[in-house]
Amino acid sequence: MRASQLFFPTLREVPAEAEMISHRLLLRGGFIRKVAAGIYDYLPLGYKVIKKIEKVVREEMDAQGAQEILMPAIVPAELYQETGRWNLDVLFRLKDRNDRDYSIGFTHEEVVTDIIRRDLRSYRQLPLNLYQIQSKGRDEARPRGGTVRGREFIMLDAYSFDRTWDDLDRAYDKMYAAFSRTFARCGLAPLVVEAESGAIGGKENQEYMVVADSGEDIILVCEKCGYAANAEKAEIGERPVKKSDDELQPLELVDTPNARTIEQVTSFLKRSPKKLVKTLIYKAGEQVVAALVRGDRDLNEAKLASMLGVKSVEMADPETILRVTKADVGFAGPVGLDKSVKIVADREVQGMMNFVVGGNKTDAHYINANIGRDFEVSEFGDLRVASKGDPCARCENTLTTVRGMEVGHIFKLGTLYSEKMGAGFLDDDGQEKPFIMGCYGMGVSRMLAAIPEVNSDQDGMVWPISVAPFEVVVILLNPDDEAQCNAATRLYEELQQQGVDVLLDERDERPGVKFKDTDLMGAPIQVVAGRLAGEGKVEVRLRSTKSKEEISIDDATAHVLELRRKLYQESEDKAQAVAVNPQLH
Ligand SMILES: [Zn+2]
């Protein structure tokens, strides 16, 4: 490709809304352009990177025996209705001319399960893994960061079907290897963290998180034992409770007019939120539950549900709160609560004394409440969202936090979808059994952003060779100089003949512009045909280290091929090092 013919509209000024490094660089370099919120064009350079990421994905998926298919982007409502997902907020819904409902596919568990229930009948046809790379639509409330969280995005989604749970473990490990190797080859070294399963459902699952300050997710990490989990999931270790030796103060009901929030109560009573206990009223089925956490902490609903042995909990409605507390929302407390309410508390509350709680009376709070004297707690446990400094649940160390950007998520779904959709097979004992499924998603267009987010410097993007828009750029500094022109053209043609993806920058531009554009674009190897060409030499540079070498023109092609081979070898070495799941073996 010649740069004079390449469409890459670079920008000097970037829109103020582009805050993330990768978003600014991709816009500046002419890789992407915004069409609408969360909806982007991929221009030639951006789409080249996308296609190279997809190539790596296909190689790794195929190597694990997965088979590529393509499912429709438009999904009939009936399929999502079968599993109860038709009403999710993220669906882009549409109607056909006959008033039938459809949605743009946002993930394809239902569609693929429908394929299998139609055409796969016997255990002999298992295991099976089908994958696709496709544009999906999700009506995200807050699209951000260019292609980081788009409303239309390109995704790999793979689905495994197995006969037994052990087979599912094997299928999952294969996808773990494929994902880990893909990210490594794309220049990413994500943390693999335990996560909540969210809207997809299922049991064991792990997220691949690229550590970046701009990441949306908070990850709790133990630097000692390697435990890593999303904040929604992270467990907090149990430690012996230290009761303070303060004297018990008398319980007192005090007026707190209009003070409902923690901020209002603490500023009115002039007490730290650490001396206050929040009482959150939930419903777990028919049971009303009061969950207590320290004033400065957040309750984790998944942990509450798990303690109560239910799938999910929901905040109690105002009528229920009025019935059990005899007060408006905002004044619930454990003292004098209706007897039907089960009181549970976070472990941290166990060590607290003389704390503030809601008064179960509008505009009133108790001060100096104490467990055992003023109310009883039926169970203590890990109920809150973990934060920095909390004890690790796997060792004696404490947890720290990093920010992460999710690039992949792998799930053991089990029979969640196959049972809902009646998708089963005949086993060798003649019994009809539901398929045991896994699903595996990777954000391809998000990787277009995640890679430069962590692989860039002040001059621009630094692409790993596997996914760079070009492997090599040959810069012809002065197109009017015959020696430079001959050197550049010769190397460009020789490299092309060797199968190298090379760009020749022969534009009629100042050298400074060419260097700037080349660094911004971020191709890993640069060959400069400049003044040295008169002496039979060119300069070969590496984008990542900015190292420069003078090489004779006769040797330059062989030298570049050797550099290229080494870069691919380094990426393969990294891929081999990460292919086994350390958390599960
Ligand atoms: Zn630990």
Image (cartoon, rainbow, N blue to C red):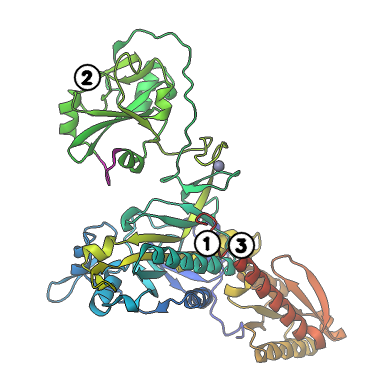
Mark 1: give few (<14), some (14-19) or many (20+) Cα within 10 Å: many
Q: Residue furthest right?
A: 535
Identify the secondary structure beneath mark 1: helix
Identify the secondary structure beneath mark 2: loop
Q: Earlier in the sequence, mark 1 or mark 3?
A: 1
Alpha carbon of mark 1 to alpha carbon of mark 3: how far?
8 Å
- Residue 270 occupies quadrant: top left
Q: Is residue 16 left or right of residue 575?
A: left
Q: Earlier in the sequence, mark 3 or mark 2?
A: 2
> Is the C-beta separation of discs 1 and 3 under 8 Å?
no
Which residue is located at x 21 percent, y 67 percent? 422
- Residue 283 occupies quadrant: top left
Report the image quarter containing ligand 1: top right
Q: Nearer the viewer, residue 448 or 577?
A: 577
Which residue is located at x 63 percent, y 73 percent? 465
In the displayed structure, 372 sits above or below 516; it is above
Stretch of the chain drawn in magenta = 308-314
Alpha carbon of mark 3 to alpha carbon of mark 2: how far?
57 Å
Residue 311 on the magenta segment? yes
Which residue is under mark 3?
A: 455
The answer to whether residue 514 is seen in the rendering is: no
Q: Is residue 521 left or right of residue 410?
A: right
Q: Which mark is residue 361?
A: 2
Which residue is located at x 49 percent, y 30 percent? 239
